[in-house]
Image (cartoon, rainbow, N blue to C red):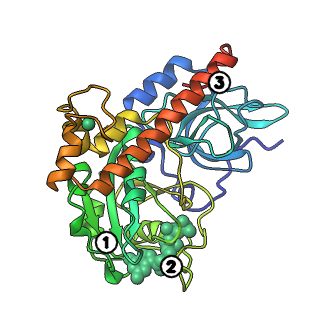
Amino acid sequence: MLLTARPTVAHVSESSPGLGRLGLTGTVRDEFAAVAPAAGQLGRVVRVDRGECDVVTDGGQIRALSDSQRAQSDVAPVTGDWVGLTADEALGWVVSHVLTRRTSIVRRDPAERASDQVLVSNVDKVAVVHGLDQDTNEARIERFLVLAIDSGAEPIVVLNKLDKSRTEVSEWDWLGDVAPVVHTSAVDGRGIEDLQSLIAPGETIVFVGPSGVGKSSLVNALAGEELVPTGKVREGDRRGRHTTTVRELLLLGSGGIVIDTPGIRAIGLWAADVALDEVFADVYSLSAQCKFRDCTHRSEPGCAVGAAVAEGTLDSTRLSRYQLLWQELAEQAREIEEQNRRSPKGRRHR
Ligand SMILES: Nc1nc2c(ncn2[C@@H]2O[C@H](COP(=O)(O)OP(=O)(O)OP(=O)(O)O)[C@@H](O)[C@H]2O)c(=O)[nH]1
Ligand SMILES: [Mg+2]
Ligand SMILES: [Zn+2]
């Protein structure tokens, strides 16, 4: 059984960066010290695939078993996690501890009835990427922004492919109130410095959005080299071809840390009520003035939201989009309650 740290995957391991370079903080160090030596070696997960993960430690990069059951840790590790690794006689390196996640992107598990799934963790910023060569899709940006804010990290909107812009984004007057907006072109380089300036050394940023919007191209533009593969979009509808297949953490020359993710078109929210009201702060603040506290803004008398729509100060389609997301979360809450009633001991659903 080979238990030495072996430098495998490129990027992070080649430079053998040490944990300081990977965003290690005093808080992580302290938490780890409290569980050491049982927790073994400290490291950060840089990619997860096929039940294993690559973990960078001070001694180099280690391939470890990530399966939560066999690894005897309660939580399955995800890219971005700080973990403890122990060497097992029979299994090799296993993740024995997953340290507390400072932030995490959580979606509704697409495979399960009503359950959550963590995509990445310990990110400082979540960049929601939209391709300006595509038609306007405010609903999708709003949904991704709810996901981003719910993570506990700071949201950023990146409007990429500025060189191919078909959309008049200045029409989205709500957007600037929710998150900083950066216009970029990964091809001609416009806005890349602006984006770079939002990623401080030691900070971790993750790119999320549909396939083909240029997430990997932005990573390469920030790095100034081809760190990750990119793929052409389809001629007809300009959709991507799902080039990126794993969530991977990479180091930028600037000292920043970036996680590239596979494109996702549709993403289910998970218990994100508070974040929803932040993304729709305009609707939310009006609703405080409605006559009824539980106003649904559909046909109740004394509805301030309805009045704003009638006056033309609130876009009715934006209100509809808010109501759709609100309904999705309300139905989910009922589902979870129902599940918990049936299996109160399970309690895996928050
Ligand atoms: N014109 C133009 N093309 C771009 C820009 N950014 C990316 N592209 C192109 O868009 C295509 C898709 O880019 P990727 O970076 O692979 O997109 P992605 O978001 O990583 O896609 P997935 O990995 O499939 O999720 C490639 O052909 C890129 O060259 C840009 O700013 N302008
Ligand atoms: Mg990609
Ligand atoms: Zn109302």
Residue placed under numbered mark 2 in the picture: 238
In the visual, does 255 lie left or right of 49? left
Residue at the extreme top: 345
Element at label 2 = loop
Query: Label 3 is placed on what type of residue?
Result: Gln
Earlier sequence position, callout 2 versus callout 3: 2
In the image shown, does 86 or 248 lie closer to the viewer?
248
What percent of the width, then of the height, locates residue 194? 24, 65
What percent of the width, then of the height, locates residue 220? 44, 70
Q: Is residue 20 visible?
A: no
Closer to the eye: label 1 or 2 = 2
Q: Say which mark, if any, is on residue 184.
A: 1
Earlier sequence position, callout 1 versus callout 2: 1
Q: Is residue 275 visible?
A: yes
- Under 8 Å from ligand 1: the CB of mark 1? yes
What percent of the width, then of the height, locates residue 77? 61, 38
Q: Residue at x 73, y 37 (%)?
A: 67
Residue at the extreme bottom: 235
